[in-house]
Image (cartoon, rainbow, N blue to C red):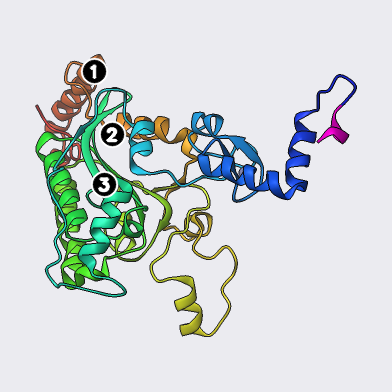
Amino acid sequence: MANNEDSRGLMSLFDWFANRRKSGSTNREHQRDIADGLWNKCTACGVLTYTKDLKANQMVCQECGYHVRVDSDERIRQLIDLNTWKPLDEHLRPLDPLEFRDRKPYSDRLRETQEKTGLVDAVQTGLGQLDNLPIALGVMDFRFMGGSMGSVVGEKLTRLIERATQKRYPVIIVCASGGARMQEGMLSLMQMAKISAALERHRAAQLLYIPVLTNPTTGGVTASFAMLGDMILAEPKATIGFAGRRVIEQTLREKLPDEFQTAEDVLKHGFVDAIIPRTHLKKTLAQLIALHQPLPTTSPHLAQWEAIVKKNREQKAGSRDSEVEMGGYPSS
Ligand SMILES: [Zn+2]
């Protein structure tokens, strides 16, 4: 280290990093620092950032805009106003009805993942406020078996949507999933239909649903609730698709372009409505929800509008076009 120290025995931060990169032993220390979570090395641009700064920027690289994957706790913190989060259905626990085993029994895999993540299954659901607007929020967690959708994910999301329909809340679901959970076989596949049916009842009640597609959103989740939004938002560069890239390449026997199944490419083809950087997500959601609120019945604009409608009706009543109504506007 001494060779880079200046006359005052100090060295620049740049030299310090350069030195650490050069030396094998400090490299290991440095790796440990990263592992300890003090520093974070960007997967995309390789720049080191102090984890605290990265967190302050919602885990988005300040250098290149790369969106580091965040877990469900962090996502809830980012979206929900402080002290307003009320989790739902935390008691629902996954079972192993098929007694499935691959390399290890499903029940062992579940227990290990639960211990490692502190989660019961791959989604957290609850009610809370987003910029003072009440919402029903579901957040999938990729750490839990790749965010796979089993019975608990399906049941929790369905109950969340049903609760939102009763309370007339908008629903937001942050998706992150490798697809259906094969260890639950058909039971996991039927969740697609169950959640979709609950969303249809929510839609029929003229309520707003916005899925936010994060990296990755694939398989059965894409084939159901991820694509059923009134507005479908995605994070930059997120992988969004149904079947995996390799499977498609092998089936078609052709090389797919690099941008295939990225949020940007999917946007171009009309499957998502907007790509919103994470640092703008909360504000954007708040604007969309506010836009979708019904007009307050006491609004002075509403009174003016009603007066115009009434006048038009009276005029039309005397004319030949009396059967023409102002479409869809409630008459009282
Ligand atoms: Zn970066």
- Name the residue tied to disc 2: 292
- The kind of residue tagged 3 is Leu
Question: What residue is drawn where x is 36% and y is 35%?
Answer: 285
Amino acid type assigned to the residue bearing label 1 in the image? Gln
Q: Nearer the viewer, mark 2 or mark 1?
A: 2
- Whether residue 6 appears in magenta in the rendering, the answer is no
- The picture places residue 287, in percent across and down from the top left corner, at 37, 30
> Few, some or many C-alpha atoms within 10 Å of disc 1 (few <14, some 14-19, many ≥20)?
few
Q: Give the Cα separation between the discs numbered 2 and 1.
A: 20 Å
Do the CB atoms of the residues marked 3 and 2 lie less than 8 Å apart? no
User: Can you give x and y, in whole percent of width and height, for residue 163 in the image?
Assistant: 12, 40
Is any atom of residue 160 visible in this view?
yes
> How many residues crowd mark 2 within 10 Å: few (<14), some (14–19), many (20+)?
few
* Amino acid at pointer 2: His
The residue positioned 22% from the left and 21% from the top of the image is 302
Q: Secondary structure at mark 1?
A: helix
Query: Is tag 2's residue or tag 1's residue first in the polypeptide sequence?
Result: 2
Q: Main secondary structure of the magenta part?
A: helix
Q: Residue 119 has which mark?
A: 3
Task: Kindly identify the residue that appears in the image at 35 percent across and 31 percent down.
Answer: 77
Up-down relation of residue 5 to residue 89 (above or below): above
Say whether residue 315 is left or right of residue 172: left
Please give the range of residues in magenta: 1-5
> Where does label 1 land, which residue?
304
Judged from the image, the secondary structure of the residue bearing numbered disc 3 is loop
